[in-house]
Amino acid sequence: MKTLFLLSIITLTAMAASPDHALFSQVLATHVRDGRVDYVALRSDSRLPRYLGQLAATNPAKLDSDAERLAFWLNAYNAYTLQLIVDRQPAKSITEIGKGGLVLGQILKTTAWDIPFAEVGGKKMTLNQIEHETIRAQFKDARAHFALVCASGSCPVLRPEAYEAGKLEAQLDDQARLFLRDSARNQFDLGKKTAQLSKIFEWYGKDFGTGPHAALLAAAKYAPDEIRRSIEASPAAWKVEFLAYDWSLNSVPTHAPPKSKP
């Protein structure tokens, strides 16, 4: 009985502790190059499973602030996505994981994002639950869409550092600027007043406002200054389109040289 009591105390203490996000930063700094991931090298890095073990033992509700909790969940989503790719080793795309492909799988809820494998606070969760039922529902910060990386070409680039409560605002603003100023993900033609936005603005339109021009204004906040001023002066003058989404794996080119550990 005494042993069980002590184990319970140890478990509760672990559940209240914050994970070591610096450990995840080390993993990212080693394996992320220009937003792309060296999954081959990541498979043999014991630091990622160690960090995931810390996530599994943490109760995020006991963290001290919303900033700590949001940073925790953003890191959890990205870290578990990395582990999913490492474990399942899809050849070309995360959409190969699960059953039914992307379209049928979404209907049947059998995609990679529906697998209950991500453990947080002793509870198994899906990536969809982390993103939609936790991050979007609880924090209502649209910038999270620029921080969550689903291992695909059109996703925001994976930051080579973990999110931290003390600098989360700056990190999220920086992610938004990087995403909106990347012509592979969002394109603005000032002369024709045409914006070709990421599908993220269409899929999660209600997180950015009502209608495509609300999404445009949300995007403009982080676009180059000349573009931002034109859109804010007359958003209705702009035509909004949405780019096709590239689901190819965000892996480094096979010829890229290995990166040494820091």
Image (spheres, helix red, strand yellow):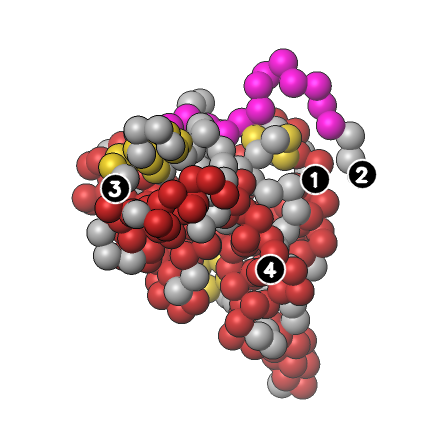
Could you say whether the residue bearing mark 3 is in a helix, strand or loop? Answer: helix
Q: CA distance from mark 3 to mark 1?
A: 42 Å
Q: Amino acid at mark 2?
A: Pro
Of labels 3 and 1, earlier in sequence is 1
Helix or strand or loop: what does disc 2 sit on? loop
Is residue 34 or residue 37 the one in the foreground? 34
Q: Residue 181: image x %, image y %?
A: 49, 37
For the residues bearing labels 2 and 1, Cβ distance under 8 angstroms = yes
Q: Quadrant of the N terminus?
A: bottom right
Which of the marked residues, 2 or 3, is nearer the chain's N terminus?
3
Identify the residue at horizontal 67%, vertical 85% (top origin): 2
* Residue receiving disc 2: 262
Q: Are marks 3 and 4 in contact (CB under 8 Å)?
A: no
Q: Which residue is mark 4?
A: 168
Q: Which mark is residue 29?
A: 1
Residue 237 circle label: 3
Q: Nearer the viewer, mark 2 or mark 3?
A: 3
Q: How many marks?
A: 4
Circle 4: residue type: Leu
Where 246 sits versus 110, above or below?
above
Q: Say if the magenta span includes residue 251.
A: yes
Looking at the image, is mark 3 or mark 4 nearer the viewer? 3
Q: Which residues are magenta?
A: 246-259
| Residue 222 seen in this snapshot | yes
Amino acid type at image mark 3: Ala
Which numbered circle lies on residue 229? Answer: none
What is the x, y in percent for residue 10? 67, 76
Q: Amino acid at mark 1?
A: Ala
Sequence-first disc among 4 and 1: 1
